[in-house]
Image: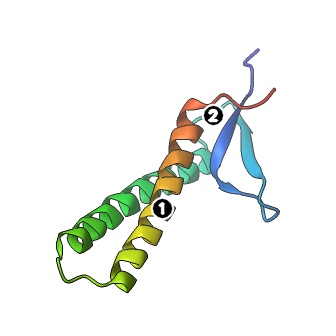
């Protein structure tokens, strides 16, 4: 018998609670969707980092630009930490 495991997904329920997938097939539809979402979150983080670095390198960047860059960077960091958690944390029993 194959034991089913729980996978933390990179999105929350409408109530803000973590979502888990019970599956024996890491290549299933929802698993592939979660993989794609994780890849999109990481790619978005790369783009946000490039934008933030550009703002920081601009000596005349004003407070609104810096605040915008920092806000997007914080969002991307939160997403990256969620991806790391999804890939490393065992699901609750």
Question: Closer to the observer: label 1 or label 2?
Answer: 1
Nearer-N-terminus badge (1/2): 2
User: For mark 2, does the 10 Å Cα neighbourhood hold few (<14), some (14 to 19), or many (20 or more) residues?
Assistant: few
Nearest to the observer: residue 10 or residue 46: 46
Q: Is 63 on the left or on the right of 71, as rendered?
A: left
Residue 63 image position (x, y, % from top left): 36, 82
The residue that appears at 17% across and 69% down in the rendered structure is 57
Verify CB contact (< 8 Å) between mark 1 and mark 2: no
Describe the element under mark 2 as helix, strand or loop. loop
Q: Would you identify the image quadrant in which residue 20 lies?
A: top right
Q: Which residue is drawn at 59% across and 45% down?
A: 31
Residue 49, x across and y down, in percent: 31, 61
Quarter in which the N terminus is drawn: top right
User: Quick check: 7 above or below 83?
Assistant: above
| Label disc, if present, on residue 25 of the rendered structure | 2
The residue under label 1 is 74
């Amino acid at each position: 018998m194959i034991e089913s495991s729980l996978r933390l997904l990179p999105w929350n329920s409408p109530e803000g609670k973590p979502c888990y997938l019970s599956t024996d097939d890491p290549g299933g539809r929802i698993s592939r969707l979660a993989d794609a979402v994780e890849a999109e979150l990481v790619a978005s983080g790369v783009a946000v980092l490039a934008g933030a670095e550009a703002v920081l390198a601009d000596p005349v960047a004003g407070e609104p630009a810096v605040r915008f860059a920092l806000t997007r960077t914080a969002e991307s960091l939160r997403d990256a930490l969620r991806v790391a958690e999804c890939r490393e944390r065992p699901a609750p029993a």
